[in-house]
């Protein structure tokens, strides 16, 4: 049976969030679940994978956190385990915007169901903004959406401050992978005085799962933060692999480039790392290869399960 991959988040006050870390990590490990969960004073965020029984047990533990009883999650499947280990990390924010005082539990944009999204983005009074990072947008987005070309989500507020100076449309519709970044971005826009702010409920993943392909306004594939790398319509496994130096998605064509060396560089990151970094990456690849030859798993292997022959 394929493994269940569950993406989840919930904004809820967790002032004693650090106390929940060992309990949550132990429960997930006992259930045979792997992945990453972030805990902060503002809530919980993560993606985990495991058997049906394991995921259900882990979700029961997460929903037992204060204020998380109604936590919703999105599911897809994977043929092989997309994570190496189970990690529960403590963070200042469960998604980093870097703006003090933004609280999605008190102020947030208007949720738009996937089946109503096409009509909203087709409205000439609506500007559509992709809140994801540039490498994510690069492999797929909605028709006509604006790409802020940000390297990290914390760059979004500065980008928007400049964008708002020339924007003339009254409605602002935003979307992201699973919805969590839009909780913060719409709350931020509301704090700046914008009234007609909307976001795609459940994010791109819910849209791809829900909206029939013949009606879809999505173009390309959606980047996901695990070994699947990308998914397409109906959340089917996408066509991209990943550069294990910079973690960007890469195509088969990229892998034929002279700039591509597995685990060391790709055309997108060839000039980003020092020779010392590249030597470190090369040593990691050597140890991974030797471990595979011995039939062992290497801790640095991560998501390096080949998707393509």
Image (tube, grey):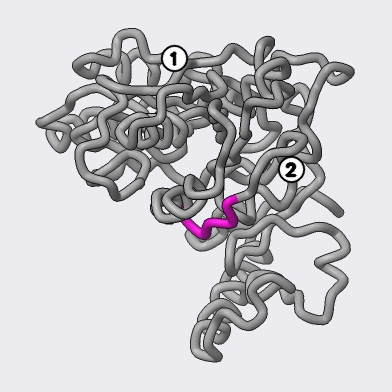
Find the distance from the CA under tag 2 to the CA under tag 1.
Answer: 25 Å
Q: Which residue is mark 1?
A: 72
Q: Secondary structure at mark 2?
A: strand
Badges 2 and 1: C-beta atoms under 8 Å apart? no
The x, y position of residue 197, in whole percent, is 47, 25
Residue occupying the point 84% across, 75% down: 257
Tell me the quarter of the picture where residue 66 sits.
Answer: top left
Residue occupying the point 76% across, 79% down: 259
* Quarter placement of the N terminus: top right
Which stretch is magenta?
148-153
Residue occupying the point 12% across, 33% down: 19
Tell me the quarter of the picture where residue 105 sits.
Answer: top left
Image depth: mark 2 or mark 1 in front: 2
In the shown orientation, is residue 69 left or right of residue 47?
left
The x, y position of residue 110, in whole percent, is 46, 17
Dominant secondary structure of the residues highlighted in magenta in the image: loop
Q: Secondary structure at mark 1?
A: loop
Determine whether 283 is above or below 305 in the image.
Answer: below
The reply to whether the magenta stretch includes residue 183 is no
**Which circle marks residue 140 in the picture?**
2
The reply to whether the magenta stretch includes residue 152 is yes
Residue occupying the point 50% across, 28% down: 179
């Amino acid at each position: 049976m394929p493994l269940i991959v569950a993406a989840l988040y919930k904004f809820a006050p967790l002032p004693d969030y650090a106390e929940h870390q060992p309990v949550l990590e132990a429960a997930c490990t006992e259930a045979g679940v792997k992945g990453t969960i972030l805990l902060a004073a503002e809530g919980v965020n993560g993606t985990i994978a495991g058997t049906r029984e394991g995921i259900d047990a882990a979700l029961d533990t997460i929903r037992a956190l204060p204020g998380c009883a109604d936590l919703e999650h999105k599911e897809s499947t994977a043929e092989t385990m997309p994570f190496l280990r189970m990690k529960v990390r403590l963070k200042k924010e469960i998604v980093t915007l870097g703006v003090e005082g933004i609280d999605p539990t008190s102020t947030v944009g208007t949720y738009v169901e996937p089946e109503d999204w096409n009509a909203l983005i087709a409205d000439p009074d609506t500007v559509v903004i992709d809140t994801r990072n540039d490498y994510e947008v690069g492999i797929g987005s909605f028709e006509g959406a604006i790409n802020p070309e940000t390297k990290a989500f914390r760059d979004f507020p500065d980008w928007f401050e400049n964008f708002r100076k020339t924007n003339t449309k009254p409605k602002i519709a935003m979307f992201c992978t699973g919805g969590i970044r839009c909780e913060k971005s719409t709350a931020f826009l509301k704090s700046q005085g914008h009234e007609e702010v909307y976001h795609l409920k459940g994010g791109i993943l819910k849209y791809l799962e829900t909206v029939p392909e013949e009606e879809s306004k999505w173009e390309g594939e959606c980047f996901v933060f695990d070994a699947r790398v990308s998914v397409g319509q109906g959340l089917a496994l996408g066509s991209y692999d990943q550069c294990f130096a910079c973690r960007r998605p890469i195509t088969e064509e990229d892998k034929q480039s002279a700039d591509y060396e597995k685990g060391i560089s790709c055309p997108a990151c060839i000039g980003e790392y020092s020779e010392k970094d590249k030597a470190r990456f090369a040593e990691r690849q050597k140890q991974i290869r030797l471990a595979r030859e011995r039939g062992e798993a290497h801790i640095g292997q991560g998501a390096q399960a080949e998707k393509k022959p």
